[in-house]
Each structure stands twice: as structure tokens, then as C-alpha cells.
Image (cartoon, rainbow, N blue to C red):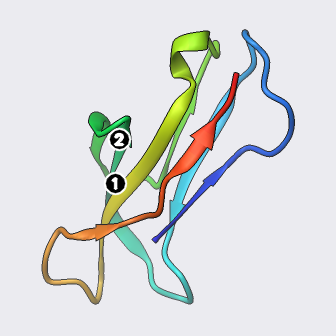
């Protein structure tokens, strides 16, 4: 899985979107999002969440975990992505 974050400089009050995607043509069917190892959303049928309005406490490391068509277990975890506010 790959966790993508809205590009560009992020300021307080902005909106940032986190999107969890599988490599290739694999569809992700359920997703969980984690901030500093704490679950912040999920299970979701969608693959993205938005943080708004962005605040200083939103800064830190995020990961996503997902289940897709080819995975039989809930253990696919993305590499961490850092959000800086």
C-alpha cells in the first residue's frame, strides 16, 4: 500500500487529504488510517480521509492499513508519511 498526502506547504486552517492506494491495478476494499500508531479512522469503504481545519496536533506520522481483493489477512501496511503543519 502507498499512503499519499496532499502536496505543498500546509498551514493551520488548510485541508489535507490522505489517500491509501494499492500498487498496480489492485482495488482496496477497506482502509484504516493511523496517526502516530493510533487509529484515527476505519474501517472505511473509501480510501481517503480529510483533516480539516488542519491544526498543529495533526502533524506527525501517518500510515494506512488496507484489505484488497488479493489479500486474505488484514496485514498490508503502508510506509509512514509525515505531515508537517
Q: Position of residue 80 (x, y in %)?
A: 49, 54
Q: Secondary structure at mark 1?
A: loop
Q: Secondary structure at mark 2?
A: strand
Q: Nearer the viewer, mark 1 or mark 2?
A: 2
Q: Earlier in the sequence, mark 1 or mark 2?
A: 2
Q: Position of residue 62 (x, y in %)?
A: 47, 43
Residue drawn at (32%, 64%), measured in percent from left and top?
66
68 left or right of 54 in image: left
| Location of the C terminus (image quadrant) | top right
Q: Is residue 14 above or below residue 79?
A: above
> Label 1 belongs to which residue?
45
- In depth, the one of 85 and 30 nearer the eye is 85
Q: Is residue 26 above or below residue 50?
A: below
Q: Is residue 75 above or below residue 39?
A: below
Task: Report, in whole angstroms, how far the alpha carbon at label 1 lies from the one at label 2.
Answer: 16 Å
> Label 2 belongs to which residue?
34
Residue drawn at (44%, 78%), measured in percent from left and top?
27
Q: Is residue 54 above or below residue 22?
A: above
- In depth, the one of 60 and 47 nearer the eye is 60
Residue drawn at (13%, 76%), measured in percent from left and top?
73
46 left or right of 83 in image: left
Residue drawn at (54%, 88%), measured in percent from left and top?
25
- In the rendered structure, are the residues bearing label 1 and label 2 in contact, judged by CB atoms less than 8 Å apart? no
Mark 2: few/some/many CA within 10 Å (<14, 14-19, 20+): some
Q: Position of residue 4 (x, y in %)?
A: 63, 56
- Quadrant in which residue 51 is drawn: top right
Amino acid at each position: 500500500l502507498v499512503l499519499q498526502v496532499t502536496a505543498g506547504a500546509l498551514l493551520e486552517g488548510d485541508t489535507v487529504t490522505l489517500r491509501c492506494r494499492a500498487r498496480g491495478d489492485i482495488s482496496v476494499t477497506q482502509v484504516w488510517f493511523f496517526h502516530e500508531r493510533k487509529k484515527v479512522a476505519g474501517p472505511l469503504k473509501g480510501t481517503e480521509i480529510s483533516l480539516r481545519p488542519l491544526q498543529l496536533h495533526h502533524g506527525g506520522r501517518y500510515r494506512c492499513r488496507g484489505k484488497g481483493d488479493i489479500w486474505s489477512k488484514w496485514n498490508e501496511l503502508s510506509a509512514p508519511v509525515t505531515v508537517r503543519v
